[in-house]
């Protein structure tokens, strides 16, 4: 099957065009070799899962480590029930291991343990049974909240001192935000406010967007496979429109080569990239639709609306500012201050906000009607 530009889920090198994972997080191998625990955080759909899955696969193939990326997301359904969250997560881990690891590196049966100790007991049993040092990346860690989140972090911290013989030799938390900004119900502004439940971290790393050169290198993989050329102007325009946001880079290229310039003898030009941009915005593809959903959060609107209006930001909490940046909606400008992250978002965001206002107006009108005598009657939902 020929490779494609991927816009749905993690990339696989045999199926998708992708940049070398080691170049995106060059510090990863050194941290693992030093048996460190660390954090990787970045906005959604910039390639965290793709990159970390590729890095762990490479470590396992080398034969030195038993390395795996596992998901914490299923535990999010149980924010107030640590025991239930633990069981859901451990079930997901076993499925991840069965998919990605050879039989000899599979975890043993999870030991019996009371709620609040199940993750730590499982990690201890797996590390002791593994014929190689165990390396784990806990993806979507900040999907957990409240008791479940703090409980997992404390179990990892407790086991850290017993590594590598009785706990993973290296472990990474991967999510949208750095550990001190994980959301909890209590505490300052609903955050941990302190790294104390995970004060064993050595580093916090982030993934940046693609550079101009990386955009050209990604598109050149398609040229090498098919002969279809992306002109220099097309590559430059793609970078300009996206500022290197990886999902957008792939989405523009996919629209260009699969819908607009399907003949590989036809070069992808600047005009084709512009047409692809217009179509993505018109369709509100998955990434852009989820972006619009974030704009319904008051804490996001408080940051976005003054920027769109060209006004100075009012007194906004630092957490709200960091949250908008962590979502990838805004970025620091060279002149100082914050700007919308890229030109595509600058088109999508005002349309989404206007659409929301229109829906609110329609809903308000639908909730009231006028009697023949002209008296307004408010409709009350049952």
Image: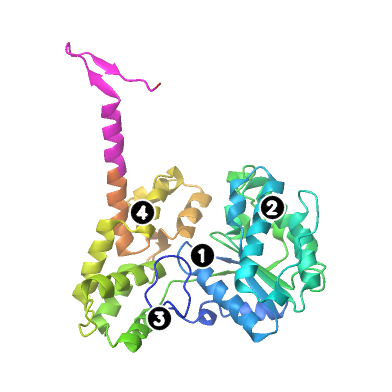
Q: Quadrant of the N terminus?
A: bottom left
Q: Please determine whether, in this image, residue 175 is positioned above or below residue 252.
A: above
Task: Kindly tell me whether residue 136 is visible in this rendering.
Answer: yes
Counting residues from the start of the chain, the first of labels 2 and 3 encountered is 2
- Give the mark toward the camera: 4 or 1: 4
Q: Which residue is found at the position 40% from the left and 49% from the top? A: 293
- Give the mark toward the camera: 3 or 4: 4
Q: Residue 357 lies in magenta, yes or no?
A: yes
Identify the residue under disc 3.
214
- Give the mark toward the camera: 2 or 3: 2
Q: Which residues are magenta?
A: 356-381
- Crowding at mark 3 (Cα within 10 Å: few <14, some 14-19, many 20+): some
- Left or right? Give the position of 113 relative to 11: right
The percent position of residue 249, horizontal first and vertical second, equals 35, 71
Identify the residue under disc 4.
289
Answer yes or no: do the residues labelled 4 and 2 have beta carbons within 8 Å?
A: no
């Amino acid at each position: 099957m020929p490779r494609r530009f991927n816009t749905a889920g993690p990339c696989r090198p045999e199926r998708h065009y992708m940049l070398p994972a080691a170049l995106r997080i060059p510090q990863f191998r050194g941290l693992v070799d030093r048996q460190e625990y660390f954090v990787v955080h970045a906005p959604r759909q910039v390639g965290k899962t793709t990159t970390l899955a590729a890095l762990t696969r490479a470590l396992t193939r080398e034969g030195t480590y038993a390395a795996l990326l596992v998901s914490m997301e299923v535990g999010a359904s149980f924010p107030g029930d640590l025991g239930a969250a633990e069981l859901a997560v451990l079930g997901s881990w076993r499925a991840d291991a069965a998919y990605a690891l050879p039989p000899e590196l599979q975890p043993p049966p999870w030991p019996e343990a009371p709620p609040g100790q199940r993750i730590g007991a499982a990690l201890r049993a797996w590390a002791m049974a593994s014929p190689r040092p165990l390396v784990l990346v806990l993806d979507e860690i900040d999907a957990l909240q409240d008791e479940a989140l703090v409980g997992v972090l404390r179990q990892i911290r407790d086991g850290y001192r017993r590594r590598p013989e009785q706990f993973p030799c290296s472990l990474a938390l991967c999510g949208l935000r750095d550990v001190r900004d994980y959301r909890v119900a209590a505490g300052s502004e609903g955050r941990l406010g302190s790294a104390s439940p995970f004060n064993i971290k050595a580093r916090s790393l982030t993934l940046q967007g693609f550079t101009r050169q990386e955009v050209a290198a990604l598109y050149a993989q398609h040229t090498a496979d098919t002969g279809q050329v992306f002109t220099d102007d097309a590559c430059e325009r793609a970078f300009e429109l996206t500022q290197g946001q990886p999902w957008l880079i792939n989405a523009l290229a996919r629209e260009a080569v699969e819908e607009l310039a399907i003949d590989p003898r036809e070069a992808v030009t600047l005009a084709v990239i512009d047409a692809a941009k217009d179509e993505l915005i018109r369709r509100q593809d998955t990434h852009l639709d989820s972006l619009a959903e974030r704009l319904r959060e008051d804490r996001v609107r408080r940051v976005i609306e003054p920027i769109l209006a060209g006004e100075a930001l009012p007194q906004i909490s630092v957490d709200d500012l960091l949250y908008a940046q962590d979502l990838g909606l805004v970025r620091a400008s060279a002149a100082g201050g914050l700007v919308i992250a890229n030109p595509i978002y600058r088109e999508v965001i005002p349309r989404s906000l206007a659409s929301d206002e229109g829906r609110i107006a329609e809903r308000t009108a639908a909730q009231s009607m006028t009697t023949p005598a002209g008296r307004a009657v408010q409709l009350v939902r049952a």
